[in-house]
Image (cartoon, grey):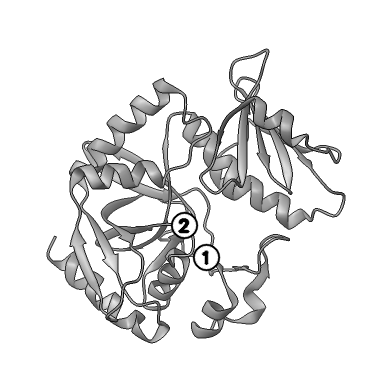
């Protein structure tokens, strides 16, 4: 977690705590689209939030005192599960609430810049990122991409370098089993230990393009379509981390920022068959599109 530069934050684990679902839902600020987490606001101090990950843990966040405390719902909740919740869900939301844009995206880079993949869970962001890494690109991360800007140029950096794959992707991409570890109790994804890359790790890279992974269609075809600025803005909003999307001040700032990003960096809708044998063809299509930018 050091790469997130949260040295001033206190992160701790509390005792097992049962969750009263009815009470949480009554005072909820929002629940995500798939019902996996619910956020409530602190009653006595601004900047306090509780995030309930149903069936896993509740997390107390104090933005003012920079404190995070996680309470598992069961005594058997593993260390890996707690780390996963903190790294992949809680900390990106804290960064976003501090006014930064954090996209739920996989990203790879070359000398020409970085490209990022966005889309619904299961669309293949991690697999496509991993396959491009095998094809010579530098992996930045497969989950949370922090966007920054300087002199009208937008940059991306991973909140931390990560790669998590399902067993069939691991087998098809010939990932070494010795490089695997468990992600969390509730998923059969494995965390892949990647080799250090001093040229890419923890560095901001100029963003060259975004690719939104569309649902697979019939016809076994690979297609790329440049998206409009409006489409891209909505895509960024949908695929961004947020602690409190009902906060109007944060929402207005985010919309302004993603509008500038969408107007500067091109985005494409990418449709392709989910067949491992076709990934080299997907790589060629991406490279061809990048060459035309």
Between 207 and 271, which is closer to the camera in this rendering?
271
Looking at the image, residue 147 sits to the left or right of residue 14; the answer is: left
Number of on-image labels: 2
- Disc 2 element: loop
Distance (Cα) linking label 1 and label 2: 7 Å
Residue 258 x %, y %:
30, 38
Q: Quadrant of residue 139?
A: bottom left
Q: Is residue 263 above or below residue 198?
A: above
Using the image as rendered, state which of residue 32 and residue 232 is in the foreground: 32
Counting residues from the start of the chain, the first of labels 1 and 2 encountered is 1
Is 88 located above or below residue 218 in the figure?
above
Identity of the residue drawn at 28% across and 42% down: 233
Quadrant of res 210: bottom left
- Residue identified by numbered label 2: 201
Q: Quadrant of the C terminus?
A: bottom left
Give SS at disc 1.
Answer: loop
Residue 150 seen in this snapshot: no
In percent of width and height, residue 251 lies at 39, 28
- Identify the residue at image location x=47%, y=41%: 241
- CB of mark 1 within 8 Å of CB of mark 2? yes
At a point 42% along the width and 83% down the height, the residue shown is 276
Q: Position of residue 143 (x, y in %)?
A: 49, 55
On the image, numbered disc 1 is attached to which residue?
196
Point out residue 285 in the picture as x, y percentages from the top left corner.
23, 74
Residue 225 in sight here: yes
For residue 254, above or below residue 291: above
């Amino acid at each position: 977690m050091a790469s997130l530069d949260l040295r001033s934050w206190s992160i701790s684990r509390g005792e097992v705590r049962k969750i009263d679902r009815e009470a949480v839902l009554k005072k909820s600020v929002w629940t995500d689209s798939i019902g996996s987490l619910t956020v409530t606001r602190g009653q006595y101090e601004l900047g306090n939030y509780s995030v309930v990950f149903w069936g896993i843990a509740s997390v107390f966040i104090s933005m003012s005192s920079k404190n995070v405390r996680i309470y598992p719902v069961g005594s058997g909740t593993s260390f890996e599960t707690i780390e996963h919740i903190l790294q992949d869900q809680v900390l990106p939301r804290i960064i976003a609430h501090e006014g930064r844009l954090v996209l739920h995206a996989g990203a790879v880079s070359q000398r020409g810049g970085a490209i990022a993949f966005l889309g619904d869970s299961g669309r293949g962001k991690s697999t496509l990122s991993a396959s491009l890494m095998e094809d010579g690109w530098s992996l930045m991360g497969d989950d949370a991409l922090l966007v920054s800007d300087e002199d009208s140029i937008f940059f991306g950096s991973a909140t931390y370098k990560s790669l998590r794959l399902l067993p069939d992707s691991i087998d098809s991409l010939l990932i070494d089993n010795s490089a695997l570890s468990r992600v969390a109790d509730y998923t059969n994804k494995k965390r892949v230990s990647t080799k250090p890359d001093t040229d890419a790790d923890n560095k901001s890279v100029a963003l060259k393009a975004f690719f939104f992974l569309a649902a697979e269609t019939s016809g076994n075809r690979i297609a790329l379509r440049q998206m409009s600025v409006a489409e891209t803005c909505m895509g960024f909003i949908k695929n961004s981390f947020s602690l409190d999307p009902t906060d109007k001040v944060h929402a207005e700032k985010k919309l302004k920022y993603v509008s500038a990003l969408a107007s500067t960096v091109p985005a494409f809708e990418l449709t392709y068959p989910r067949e491992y044998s076709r990934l080299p063809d997907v790589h060629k299509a991406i490279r061809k599109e990048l060459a035309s930018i």
